[in-house]
Amino acid sequence: MIRDELARLIKEGYKALGELEFVETSAGYRLYHCADRDLLDEARVYHSTEDARQIAKYDSAGVYRPLKGAPNLPRGWLLELATIDDLKRALDYLYPGAIATLLAYQAGTAHPVSLRQTLNRQTGMYRVTRKLSDDQAQSLVKEACRSDGKCLRTILWGLTESRPPDFLPSSKSDPTCDQTGQKRAALPILCLEACNLLVAAARATLKKPSG
């Protein structure tokens, strides 16, 4: 089960996921924003996994977070959780599907889907994204998906099925790299396929007036 695998990963020394850090305590687990690791005495304490859902919704300015991989989680909170099941649920609210995707990829049951595959199956108003050139695609992904301010996911898909994401910094496609740049023992948030927000950005790129 996923909870057992999560417990195994924690015992192996992993203690972070995206902007999150977690530690095992005598009472269960503590989950918090990495920037608050030395300020937990000042943090507002929560005890329900449902609180994680609310924390994930908005950034510190109260703006809705459509991209859960964005490095803009609010700070100043601490989740005290009793069980590994609670920790798993909280992580799923903050980074939906991250643990399950990682385990499926490691087991060989989930595989990257190239950007061309994703765009070529678009219909309706997004059908135009099939016309995105390689140069346009590379520029778009470099800007929209960069870890320093945009998205903390580790990209494993390339432009085509036979081409790896070699146009990105090598760290962006390396599951062993902490995308926050802190070099922690962090579990990667894998990106196996371009998200809907990137597809929408591709459409916007093609709809821009020329010149």
Image (tube, rainbow, N blue to C red):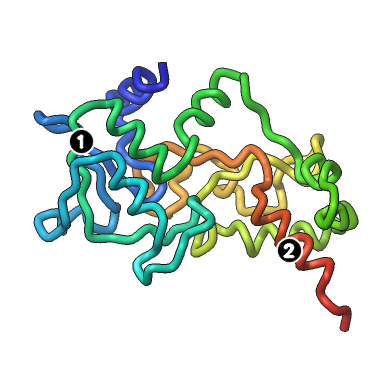
Crowd rating for badge 2 (residues with CA inside 10 Å; few <14, some 14–19, many 20+): few
Name the residue: 82% across, 61% down. Answer: 135
CB within 8 Å, label 1 to label 2: no
Observer-nearest residue: 177 or 19?
A: 19
The residue identified by callout 2 is 139
Residue 87 % position (x, y): 29, 33
Residue type indicated by callout 1: Leu
Please give the label number shown on residue 62. none
Residue 193 to residue 83: above or below: below
Q: How many marks?
A: 2
Looking at the rendered structure, the secondary structure element under dot 2 is helix
Find disc 1 in the rendering and name its residue: 81
| Residue 53 locus on image (x, y percent) | 36, 47
Vertical comparison of 159 with 88: above or below: below
Q: Quadrant of residue 12?
A: top left
Quarter holding the C terminus is bottom right
Against 70, residue 23 (above or below) is above
Could you tell me which residue is drawn at 27 percent across and 26 percent down?
84
Front position among marks 1 and 2: 1
| Outermost residue to the bottom | 211
Quarter containing the N terminus: top left
Q: Residues within 10 Å of mark 1 (few under 14, many from 20)?
A: many
Q: Is residue 156 left or right of residue 59?
A: right
**Front-most of residues 192 and 54:** 54
Rendered location of residue 9, percent (x, y): 35, 25
At x 71%, y 59%, the residue is 200
Q: Quadrant of residue 41?
A: bottom left
* Residue drawn at 23 percent across, 60 percent down: 76
Query: Where residue 68 sits: x, y (%)?
Result: 48, 51
**Please, what is the three-letter code of the amino acid marked with disc 2?**
Ser
Q: Looking at the image, is mark 1 or mark 2 earlier in the sequence?
A: 1
